[in-house]
Image (cartoon, rainbow, N blue to C red):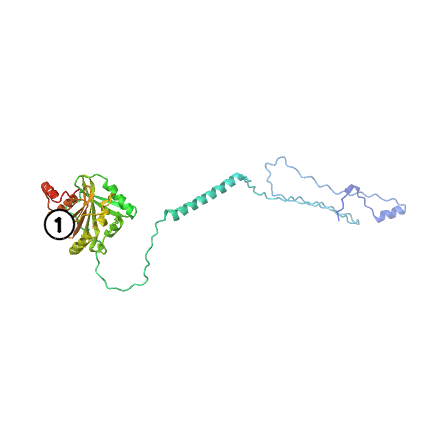
């Protein structure tokens, strides 16, 4: 229910039962003086507020209605409700963030994707490509061991065989790109075309991946067909050299035999069969042997017997000799002269060579 609206006090008339009775009896009613509540004096406002100390604000005093006269009914005075203002604390205002354009966001995302892709490719290259090495098959490792007695350590390397005394005049190493017959023959033909000092010996060392070829490997790659069990009587080391004469380089092959007597038997038997055709690839010649060949002949040089065969190639002949444990093959008699002089330590005069040439019926042709 809404509060009644208060009326001004001047319009309020107080009536009593006594007045009503007097009016009815013809007695004039006495006018009573109207009580006016005293007006409180206004507060004195100071002239200046500079020297006044302001105390904390207090709510204004609540006006109190004067008490009603004696015998009068109580008057309900409704005072206006005063609600003090509520102070709301201020909240800090944060700065508004600017909205990032869409193209910048897309650019950042694209850059991140590119960086991730590049890092992945680099990791793949680092792990699978850069660190990739030729695969090797390791032999299976036994998981069981057998106890053995301690033994004295043995040398894993042996001293190389000494094939010359003062030779060679020059040494060249050829490392084959592949262990094939074509690679070896092409390399030797290329080396044979290089001009060197006349009557000099140039040793050719052949390796594959830095490892020297064995005698058996050399025979197989050169397609030199030796009799069965022939190579088992010889060391794995051998010497291949070129003797440089006026007509070009002539190959020399030296093997070291384990049994000299067996070597003599082997060469006698091989000579009677197919020695010329079997050893012919050593000549590095594009010519072919004649279908019919004469038999081998002999001559002595510095007291050493030499077997030779003319093969109808100018200034070329097949010569072989056995000196101590060395089996020597040469593609010219002049090359055999130089090798035997070095091994025996004996030198001969030019007159001796001329007489030897006449005695063997011009064997260099």
Residue 17 seen in the current view: yes
Q: Residue furthest top?
A: 47
Q: x, y percentage for residue 134?
A: 34, 50
Q: Is residue 264 left or right of residue 57?
A: left
Q: Nearer the viewer, residue 162 or 77?
A: 162
Residue 100 seen in the current view: no
Say which element carries label 1: strand
Q: Nearer the viewer, residue 172 or 313?
A: 313
Task: Answer few, some or many: residues within 10 Å of disc 1's Cα (few below 14, many 20 plus, some between 14 and 19).
Answer: some
Q: x, y percentage for residue 197?
A: 18, 39
State the residue position of label 1. Answer: 305
Q: Is residue 322 left or right of residue 181?
A: left
| 217 is higher (above) or lower (below) than 152 | above
Q: Nearer the viewer, residue 359 or 200?
A: 359
Q: x, y percentage for residue 347?
A: 10, 44
| 314 is higher (above) or lower (below) than 149 | above
């Amino acid at each position: 229910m809404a509060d009644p609206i208060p009326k001004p006090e001047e319009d309020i008339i107080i009536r009593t039962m006594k007045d009503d009775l007097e009016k009815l009896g013809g007695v004039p009613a006495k006018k009573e003086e109207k009580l006016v509540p005293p007006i409180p004096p206004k507060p004195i406002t100071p002239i200046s507020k500079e020297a006044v100390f302001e105390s904390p604000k207090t709510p204004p005093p609540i006006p109190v209605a004067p008490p009603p006269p004696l015998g009068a009914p109580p008057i309900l005075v409704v005072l206006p409700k005063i609600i003090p203002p509520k102070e709301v604390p201020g909240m800090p205002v944060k700065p508004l963030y600017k909205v990032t354009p869409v193209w910048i966001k897309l650019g950042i995302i694209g850059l991140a994707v590119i960086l991730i892709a590049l890092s992945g490719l680099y990791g793949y290259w680092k792990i699978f490509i850069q660190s990739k090495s030729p695969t090797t098959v390791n032999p299976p490792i036994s998981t069981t061991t057998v106890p053995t007695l301690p033994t004295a350590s043995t040398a894993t390397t042996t001293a190389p065989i000494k094939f010359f005394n003062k030779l060679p005049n020059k040494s060249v190493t050829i490392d084959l790109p592949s262990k094939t017959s074509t690679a070896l023959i092409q390399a030797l033909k290329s080396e044979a075309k290089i001009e060197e000092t006349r009557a000099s010996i140039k040793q050719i060392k052949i390796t594959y991946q830095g490892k020297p070829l064995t005698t058996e490997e050399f025979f197989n790659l050169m397609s030199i067909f030796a009799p069965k069990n022939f190579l088992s009587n010889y060391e794995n080391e051998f010497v291949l050299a070129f003797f440089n004469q006026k007509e070009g380089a002539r190959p020399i092959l030296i093997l070291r035999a384990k049994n000299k007597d067996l070597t003599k038997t082997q060469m006698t038997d091989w000579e009677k069969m197919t020695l010329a055709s079997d050893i012919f690839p050593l000549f590095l010649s594009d010519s072919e042997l004649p279908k019919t060949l004469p038999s081998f002949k002999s001559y002595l040089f510095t007291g050493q017997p030499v077997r030779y065969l003319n093969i109808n190639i100018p200034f070329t002949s097949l010569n072989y000799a056995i000196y101590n444990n060395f089996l020597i093959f040469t593609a010219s008699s002049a090359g055999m002269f130089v090798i035997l002089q070095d091994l025996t330590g004996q030198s001969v005069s030019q007159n001796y060579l001329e007489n030897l040439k006449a005695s063997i019926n011009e064997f260099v042709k």
